[in-house]
Image: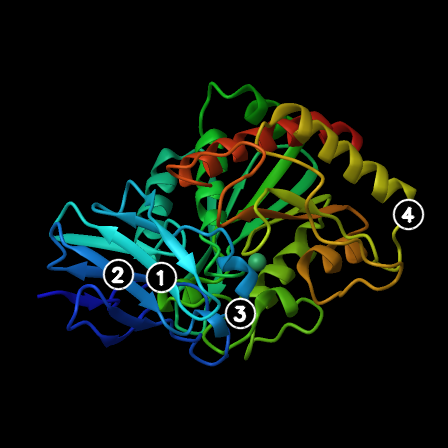
């Protein structure tokens, strides 16, 4: 008999009917205090070699329905190696067809990065002694918000990820960045650390991550719409990180995300902020052009439409930081699907590719550091 559960760190599924393995009915749960949903992560027991048809019946009401177009879910037997499985969307349900090769199999929207993995990684990084670690404050659920600082230079680089907890590619990317920063052999890291101090918040939304949310924290706040009016009640994560930024100043900002619909990596500038000027545009173009040279996974054709002058939403981190500190400030979006410019049908966009991509960003950061102020 098949049983299904999501009663674990970052899990999300509502089980409706599992009596027939060829017609399993599930629904994705909305974020606790908000209506967003798209992230799913669940375990199937008793799956051994039986062809299963798993329907996520409320997929048509998900937050980003375009995200299901040409989308393939990920599966894993060990929660380490994640591979793509046959998935289709008929305008109502998202249907996964898979014959598991093991008794137990996990399915998810993207390779999960639960808070348990996060904590283990933080502890390991702390023991290297190569980065300063501090706790910026606590989330609503009482989790520690970690900040790593590395480098000796006067420029203040800030990199944050997982404002949106369902965008786990952000954590895989940050893992790739942190691993290079502690590697004494990495030349880009050494060069950047001479010129700059890097401030890294690996996971902004720990409560949302643990609860299996797509987009919001424990209070139902979309953190990336809370930067102008952050509060300790509704968005303490943003409030406390913003205070820390005020203490250091900001010369470079990168906010790492995933985009549900667009099948490519892209950068979004802060174009549209009131103070946008030629210098802002040139810095963005330079970063973007160098990343395009270095990375086979990056492109500049797909992305968000440019904001009209003065139309930027200053509640969004990228725009808020650009306007407040007048610095190069960008949102990085990675796909849930695959990067069409360099496809990998077995894995799609994947943890390994996120890690490698972070190394390419690090190289560009090191190159442009001299020119950003
Ligand atoms: Zn996002």
Mark with earlier residue (2, 3):
2
Contact between labelled residues 2 and 1, with CB atoms less than 8 Å apart: yes
From the viewer's perspective, tell me whether residue 301 is left or right of residue 112.
right
- Residue placed under numbered mark 4 in the picture: 277
- Residue placed under numbered mark 3 in the picture: 63
Q: Quadrant of residue 302?
A: top right
Q: Residues within 10 Å of mark 4 (few under 14, many from 20)?
A: few
Contact between labelled residues 1 and 4, with CB atoms less than 8 Å apart: no
Q: Secondary structure at mark 2?
A: strand
Residue 141 shows in the view? yes
- How far is the residue under mark 4 from the one under mark 2? 53 Å
Mark with earlier residue (4, 2):
2
Q: Is the CB–ligand 1 distance for label 4 below 8 Å? A: no
Image quarter (top left, top right, bottom left or bottom right) of the N terminus: bottom left
Question: Residue at (13%, 49%) from the top-left corner?
Answer: 49
Mark with earlier residue (3, 1):
3
Mark with earlier residue (4, 1):
1
Foreground of the two, 12 or 10 = 12
Numbered circle sitting on residue 53: 2
- How far is the residue under mark 4 from the one under mark 1? 47 Å
């Amino acid at each position: 008999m098949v049983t299904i559960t999501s009663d674990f760190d970052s899990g999300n599924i509502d089980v409706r009917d599992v009596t027939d393995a060829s017609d399993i009915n599930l629904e994705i749960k909305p974020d606790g205090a908000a209506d967003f949903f798209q992230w799913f992560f669940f375990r199937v027991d008793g799956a051994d070699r039986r062809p299963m048809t798993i329907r996520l019946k409320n997929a048509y009401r998900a937050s980003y329905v375009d995200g299901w177009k040409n989308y393939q879910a990920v599966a894993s037997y060990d929660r380490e190696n994640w591979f793509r499985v046959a998935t289709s969307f008929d305008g109502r349900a998202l249907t996964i067809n898979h014959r598991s090769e093991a008794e137990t199999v996990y399915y998810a929207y993207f390779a999960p990065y639960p808070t348990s993995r996060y904590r283990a990684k933080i502890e390991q990084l702390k023991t290297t002694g190569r980065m300063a670690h501090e706790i910026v404050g606590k989330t609503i659920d009482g989790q520690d918000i970690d900040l790593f600082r590395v480098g000796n230079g006067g420029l203040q680089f800030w990199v944050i990820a997982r404002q949106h907890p369902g965008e786990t590619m952000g954590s895989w990317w940050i893992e790739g960045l942190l691993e290079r920063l502690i590697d004494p052999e990495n030349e880009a890291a050494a060069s950047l650390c001479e010129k700059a101090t890097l401030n890294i918040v690996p996971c902004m939304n720990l409560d949302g991550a643990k609860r299996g949310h797509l987009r919001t924290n424990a209070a139902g706040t979309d953190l990336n719409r809370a930067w102008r009016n952050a509060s300790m009640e509704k968005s303490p994560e943003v409030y406390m990180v913003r205070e820390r930024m005020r203490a250091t100043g900001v010369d470079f900002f990168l906010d790492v995300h995933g985009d549900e619909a667009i099948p490519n990596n892209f950068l979004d500038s802060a174009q549209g902020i009131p103070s946008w000027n030629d210098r802002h545009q040139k810095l963005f173009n330079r970063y973007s052009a160098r990343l395009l040279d270095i990375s086979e996974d990056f492109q500049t054709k797909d992305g968000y439409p440019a904001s009209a002058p003065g139309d930027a939403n200053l509640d969004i981190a990228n725009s808020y930081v650009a306007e407040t500190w007048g610095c190069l400030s960008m949102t990085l979006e990675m796909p849930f699907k695959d990067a069409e410019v360099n496809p990998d049908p077995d894995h799609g966009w994947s943890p390994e590719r996120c890690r490698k991509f972070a190394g390419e960003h690090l190289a560009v950061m090191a190159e442009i550091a001299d020119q950003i102020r």
